[in-house]
């Protein structure tokens, strides 16, 4: 009789041990699963020098190593504000190794006092390459406090071509774009039909024929686009000075959101 009671006690003890072990395993599993939960992503803010500064691209590309950055006054004080940003692509005349020349051309000449960030990469050889520009885009967007719904693209001459190219290959990035005296592929206008675009060109442009812009504008209109087009009767190749001095341009641009 005592032997049977002893066996029963052992069975009860073993059963209790197995139950406790299972509970312990479940608790451990819950803790492990809980540990796998990623922490909340912090909205980091990195202070920047207001005004112009010259930057080196950390990522290696085939023809972009430097860029000019403009940070508006108030950037460091408004730590929770997400700023609009404009990428500006220069023309062939600024190509080379001297990034400082970018302060004297196009949008850079009028950007001071405006309430947006400007990024102007330097193309040191060849042509604007959307793949290289994408590396710049990712680096800048990760570093700065930017409103991702208000990212804009503009450029003049070779940069006008670059605007059409980059904008059409990566249309999802941009809320609007402003190509000036450039050109592009009609076949890619389908990708841009819903994007707000304002095109500028001079009728007497002897470097890039005005037909380069006209054909793209016509293609967009046939696709139902509300593209805006300003054609100056004169001015030659330099359509950008008047374009970038048009107050209405910035009012219109900053109203555009993705």
Image: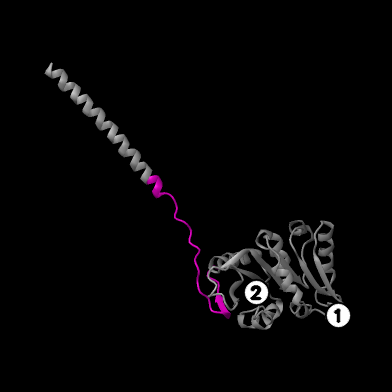
Q: Where is residue 73 in the image (x, y as percent from the top left)?
A: 58, 79
Pair 2/1: label in front:
1
Q: Name the residue under label 2.
A: 125
Which quadrant, please, contains the C terminus? bottom right
Figure quadrant of residue 51: bottom right
- State the SS at label 1: loop
Which circle's residue, 2 or 1, is located before the other in the chain?
Answer: 2
Residue 45 within the magenta-colored segment of the rendering: yes
Residue at x 65% of width, y 74% of height: 125
Residue at x 22% of width, y 24% of height: 11
Q: Mark 1 points at which residue?
A: 234
- Magenta stretch? 32-60
Q: Position of residue 85 (x, y in %)?
A: 63, 70
Which quadrant, please, contains the N terminus? top left
Figure quadrant of residue 209: bottom right
For mark 2, does the 10 Å Cα neighbourhood hold few (<14), some (14 to 19), or many (20 or more) residues?
few
Look at the magenta stretch and give its main secondary structure. Answer: loop
């Amino acid at each position: 009789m005592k032997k049977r009671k002893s066996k029963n006690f052992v069975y009860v003890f073993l059963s209790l041990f197995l139950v406790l072990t299972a509970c312990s395993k479940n608790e451990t599993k819950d803790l492990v699963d809980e540990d796998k939960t990623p922490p909340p992503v912090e909205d980091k803010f990195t202070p920047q020098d207001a005004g112009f500064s010259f930057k080196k691209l950390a990522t290696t590309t085939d023809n972009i190593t430097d860029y000019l950055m403009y940070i508006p006054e108030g950037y460091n004080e408004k730590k929770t504000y997400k700023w609009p940003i404009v990428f500006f692509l220069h023309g062939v005349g600024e190509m080379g190794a001297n990034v400082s020349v970018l302060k004297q051309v196009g949008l850079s000449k009028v950007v001071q006092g405006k309430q947006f960030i400007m990024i102007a990469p330097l193309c040191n050889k060849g042509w604007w390459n959307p793949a290289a520009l994408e590396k710049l885009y990712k680096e800048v967007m990760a570093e700065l406090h930017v409103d991702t719904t208000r990212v804009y693209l503009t450029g003049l001459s070779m940069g006008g071509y670059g605007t059409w190219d980059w904008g059409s290959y990566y249309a999802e990035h941009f809320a609007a774009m402003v190509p000036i005296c450039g050109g592009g592929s009609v076949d890619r206008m389908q990708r841009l039909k819903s994007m707000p675009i304002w095109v500028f060109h001079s009728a007497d442009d002897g470097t890039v024929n005005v037909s380069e812009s006209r054909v793209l504008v016509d293609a967009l209109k046939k696709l139902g686009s509300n593209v805006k087009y300003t054609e100056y009767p004169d001015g030659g190749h330099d359509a950008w000075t008047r374009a970038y001095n048009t107050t209405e341009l910035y009012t219109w641009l900053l109203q555009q959101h993705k």
